[in-house]
Amino acid sequence: MSVQKQEFNFDLTILGGGPAGLSAGIYAARGELKTAIIDISMLGGQPTNYLEIENYPSYSMSGGYELMEKFEEHADKFNVKKFPLENIENVKIKSKEKLIETQDKIFKSKATILATGAKARKLGIPGEEEFAGRGVSYCAVCDGAFFKEKVICVIGGGNSAIEEALYLTKFAAKVYVIHRRNELRADKIVQQRAFKNPQIEFVYDSIPLEILGENTVSSIVIKNLKTNQVKEIKTNGVFPYIGFSANAELFKDKLAKDENGFIITNAKMETSIPGVYAAGDLRNTPLRQVITAAADGAIAATFAIKYIEESK
Ligand code: NAP
């Protein structure tokens, strides 16, 4: 027997309640749009997993969770309606009326902002899936404490890899950073901190080939790309931080995307469908930060307001 879904009508629906979605919500509701934010989890998005954020202007240092709580409080002030823990099953965004369907709700709106962010990319090597949650982790803040006095390998050379490697030295006795080039991508200030930390050892020009173990991870096999030498490093944990891919499965066939699967927008955050905007990490942006996501959200909401006005 099919369940009658509860129907909601809004001017604007925002999919995703991270920095982009919440900022869009604040701008839209302040612009007098009846606005809903729908998220698969609680609101706050990826930054809620970051221990510290020190480059969001006006906060020289903030916990990621605390910063996003402020975003949410701000959205509450303007009466943005929040729908957390909603698993979006279907989106119909090509027609004038946009339709978002969850298990038991249907949201109808005049415009939609997609702000569903990005998720950690996988290494795609043997052992990664097998040992997920048993030594392989994508969240140092969540799992770091399980590795007291142990050895950890972090994969990657970007800000995430190096910041998380530094964080993991609070618990682990030793942290290897395995990077495929001989130069890190992370910001210089973060690099300098890591170079000064005696618990971190850098293994350059190397890629992981396989993660080994019995019940839990016991080693990782890596290959030096310059010498082709293959070697095994004894380790209790593997933390891949090799970037992100867009959470865009639901819109995969509907919108223009770049070669990496990120949604293409113009400077107004318009996608290839009228009335559909994309903001934050899921779009083809050159910088993925809280501040850039928030700015995207503000732009998307501003042009969604205009679009709705002009379509009257
Ligand atoms: P990223 O900057 O894209 O770095 C990914 C790293 O993984 C790069 O060093 C890359 O190597 C390496 N890599 C990619 N694919 C790989 C593969 N298949 N095998 C091995 N290594 C691979 O990703 P991110 O560090 O997650 O950062 C994403 C965005 O968030 C960035 O804009 C970053 O600045 C931002 N971020 C900011 C903060 C902060 O400001 N507090 C914290 C975290 C992240 P190459 O260098 O050779 O390409």
Image (cartoon, helix red, strand yellow):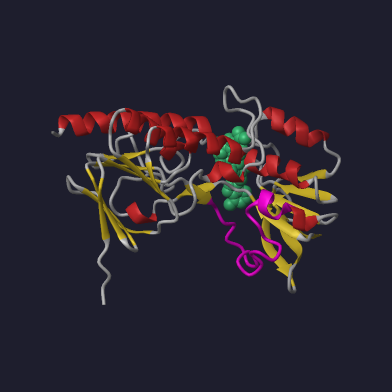
On screen, residue 106 above or below 265:
below
Where ligand 1 lies, by quadrant?
top right
User: Is the stretch drawn in magenta largely helix, strand or loop?
Assistant: loop
Viewer-side residue, 269 vs 44? 44
The residues colored magenta run: 120-144
Viewer-side residue, 45 vs 37? 37
Residue 267 visible within the image: no
Q: State the image coordinates of residue 187 (x, y, percent, origin top left).
A: 65, 31
Residue 255 is left or right of residue 57, and the answer is: left
Q: State the image coordinates of residue 291 (x, y, percent, origin top left).
A: 51, 30
**Which corner quadrant holds the C terminus?**
top left
Residue 192 visible within the image: yes
Residue 303 is left or right of residue 77, and the answer is: left
Which residue is most to the left? 312
Which residue is most to the bottom? 1
Instruction: Examine the structure image and report whether residue 129 is included in the region drawn in magenta.
Output: yes
Q: State the image coordinates of residue 71 (x, y, percent, origin top left).
A: 49, 34
Which residue is most to the top? 58
Q: Quadrant of residue 10?
A: top left
Give the tally of numbered discs: 0
On screen, residue 267 above or below 239:
above
**Which corner quadrant holds the N terminus?**
bottom left
Q: State the image coordinates of residue 311 (x, y, percent, origin top left).
A: 15, 34
Viewer-side residue, 56 vs 195? 56
At x 34%, y 28%, the residue is: 30
